[in-house]
Image (tube, rainbow, N blue to C red):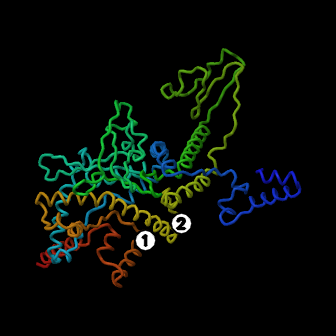
């Protein structure tokens, strides 16, 4: 009660009471969202603790634990493993393949010249990309690096890529791809109070990323020794080209680090994994038919053996434990008895409950239930609808991989090839517009697949015949192939068949 209310209360208590009641009514008066999602008075909303913060409090401060739990789910919960691998396989598959698409009109090139230039570049790129020499670790080729980096991005929410130049004998290109796990980008010791460094990412006055701090050893390694860091500028000072690639999708403005795709369903997946393990153990125990024998004569205690081989015993060092086994006969000591409770396993409600939880997990991951559990039992139209819905997400992820990983690396490769004289591209380093015209490319991956191939092929033919699509696009979407190569191969095959037919006539 303020000074005015106390003064009024001394003079006119009834008036003071009316003022207090009026004030309380104002507190209960809700308008707009305060009557619904922002209500503080409804009992159903009072227990909702939603104290939000900036991206630092909500994401950055929790990032390490999210990384560790997400990777643990991948290693130990089959549903989480399957979800990430399903997204990886349908998005990247065996790797997104380069299809050079230069702007020949702008570059004053004829169609034949443009085709020849594209064929040369694709041949040079294959020389570099098809071997493990493109990997700084000299282990994976370019397409396997796509798979690994994308899986790491799904698991940890992000993946970092360095592009060092390393000379190797008999290899014409020095560009290498070095993948870094997300944990290695972190704030160095002693710089925790520097507000311009957010979880190892240094930002400028406008929030732009200036540099990354990378630990020389993995922070979670047991033999990391003394921690040391090195700084990598985000872009070259003279060229403006990226020195490091950051594979991450942001969900909020001013966010600087990625969030694992499993983050919203970590608890659901973990609890489901525990429930599955418990049901599995209960079913195994129920399946072990064991007979316990009691005797009134102590000398007959050794009448029966446990019927479990010694090398199969789990707790053979403990004399007080009794182990169950299929068809085992176990002798009990004098005065001992066994009381059992029927666990009722297998649990008939298990499948329905798991299915319900899987549907919710699939919704969060943009994976239809059928694709999440690889269980297609619905009608053709329902299954196709689920596949098409998932394919929207796969296409979006594929565009992400192409723009964040494949295209920047291809442009670096192209610049090196032109600088070394292996690829002819006049004006590439002088005019940014010319450079962009040369760098045009498409990245094609695995096809969507068909539930009914005949219907899909007929639909593709109709789209081509009515001018809604091209043969190249339909070939890529149906089979993932290259229409130009297929036509040349068919020409060769038809020529061979005519020759064989001519010999038979002779």
Lateral position of residue 268 relative to residue 295, left or right = left
CA–CA distance between discs 2 and 1? 14 Å
Lateral position of residue 74 relative to residue 46, left or right = left
As displayed, is residue 266 above or below residue 334? below
Camera-side residue of 427 and 280: 427
Lateral position of residue 286 relative to residue 190, left or right = right
As displayed, is residue 475 above or below residue 56? below
- Asked if residue 492 can be seen in this view, the reply is yes
As displayed, is residue 348 above or below residue 479? above
Circles 2 and 1: CB atoms closer than 8 Å: no
Camera-side residue of 23 and 361: 23
Q: Position of residue 277 (x, y in %)?
A: 56, 42
Helix, strand or loop at mark 1: loop
Helix, strand or loop at mark 2: loop
Q: Position of residue 303 (x, y in %)?
A: 62, 20
Camera-side residue of 437 and 446: 437
Camera-side residue of 181 and 316: 181
Q: Position of residue 248 (x, y in %)?
A: 39, 54
Rendering quarter of residue 44:
bottom right
Q: Position of residue 412 (x, y in %)?
A: 22, 57
- Give the total of numbered labels: 2
Rendered residue at 63%/50% (across/down): 49
Nearest to N terminus: mark 2 or mark 1? 2
- Badge 1, how many Cα within 10 Å: few under 14, some, many 20+? few
Q: Quadrant of the C terminus?
A: bottom left
Provide the residue designation for mark 1. Answer: 452
Q: Which mark is residue 378?
A: 2
Residue lying at the far bottom of the rendered structure:
466
As displayed, is residue 462 above or below residue 214? below
């Amino acid at each position: 009660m303020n000074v005015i209310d106390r003064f009024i209360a001394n003079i006119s208590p009834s008036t003071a009471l009316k003022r207090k009641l009026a004030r309380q009514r104002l507190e209960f008066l809700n308008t707009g969202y305060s009557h619904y999602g922002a209500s503080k008075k409804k009992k159903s909303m009072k227990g909702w603790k939603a104290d939000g913060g900036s991206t630092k409090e909500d994401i950055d401060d929790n990032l390490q634990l999210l990384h560790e739990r997400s990777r643990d789910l991948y290693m130990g919960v089959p549903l989480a493993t399957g979800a990430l691998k399903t997204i990886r396989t349908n998005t990247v598959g065996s790797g997104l393949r380069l299809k050079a698409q230069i702007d020949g009109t702008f570059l004053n090139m004829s169609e034949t010249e443009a085709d020849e230039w594209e064929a040369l570049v694709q041949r040079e790129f294959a020389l570099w990309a098809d071997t493990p020499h493109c990997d700084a670790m000299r282990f994976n080729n370019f397409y396997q690096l796509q798979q690994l980096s994308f899986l790491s991005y799904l698991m940890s929410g992000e993946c970092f890529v360095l592009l060092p130049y390393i000379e190797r004998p008999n290899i014409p290109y020095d560009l290498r791809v070095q993948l870094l796990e997300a944990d290695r980008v972190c704030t160095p010791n002693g710089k925790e109070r520097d507000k311009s460094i957010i979880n190892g990412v240094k930002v400028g006055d406008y929030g732009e990323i200036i540099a990354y701090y990378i630990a020389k050893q993995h922070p979670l390694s047991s033999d990391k020794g003394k921690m040391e860091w090195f700084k990598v500028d985000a872009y070259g000072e003279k060229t403006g080209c990226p020195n490091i690639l950051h594979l991450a999708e942001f969900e909020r403005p001013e966010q600087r680090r990625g969030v694992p795709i499993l983050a919203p369903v970590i608890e659901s997946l973990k609890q489901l994994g525990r429930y599955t393990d418990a049901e599995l153990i209960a079913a195994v125990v129920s399946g072990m038919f064991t007979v316990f024998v009691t005797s009134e004569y102590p000398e007959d205690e050794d009448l029966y053996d446990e019927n479990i081989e010694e090398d199969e015993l789990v707790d053979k060092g403990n004399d007080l434990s009794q182990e169950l086994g299929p068809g085992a006969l176990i002798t009990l000591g004098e005065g001992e008895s066994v009381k059992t409770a029927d666990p009722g396993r297998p649990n008939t409600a298990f499948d329905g409950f798991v299915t319900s939880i899987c549907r919710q997990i699939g919704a969060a991951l943009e994976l239809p239930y059928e694709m999440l559990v690889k269980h297609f039992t619905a009608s053709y139209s329902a299954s196709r609808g689920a596949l098409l819905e998932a394919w929207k997400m796969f296409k979006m992820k594929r565009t992400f991989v192409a723009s964040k990983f494949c295209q920047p690396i291809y442009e670096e490769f192209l610049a090196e090839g032109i600088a070394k004289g292996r690829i002819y591209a006049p004006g590439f380093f002088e005019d940014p517009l010319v450079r962009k015209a040369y760098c045009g490319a498409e990245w094609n991956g695995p096809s969507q697949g068909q539930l009914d191939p005949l219907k899909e092929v007929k639909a593709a033919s109709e789209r081509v015949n009515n001018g809604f699509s091209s043969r190249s696009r339909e070939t890529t979407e149906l089979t993932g192939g290259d229409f130009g190569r297929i036509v040349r191969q068919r020409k060769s095959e038809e020529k061979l068949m005519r020759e064989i037919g001519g010999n038979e006539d002779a």
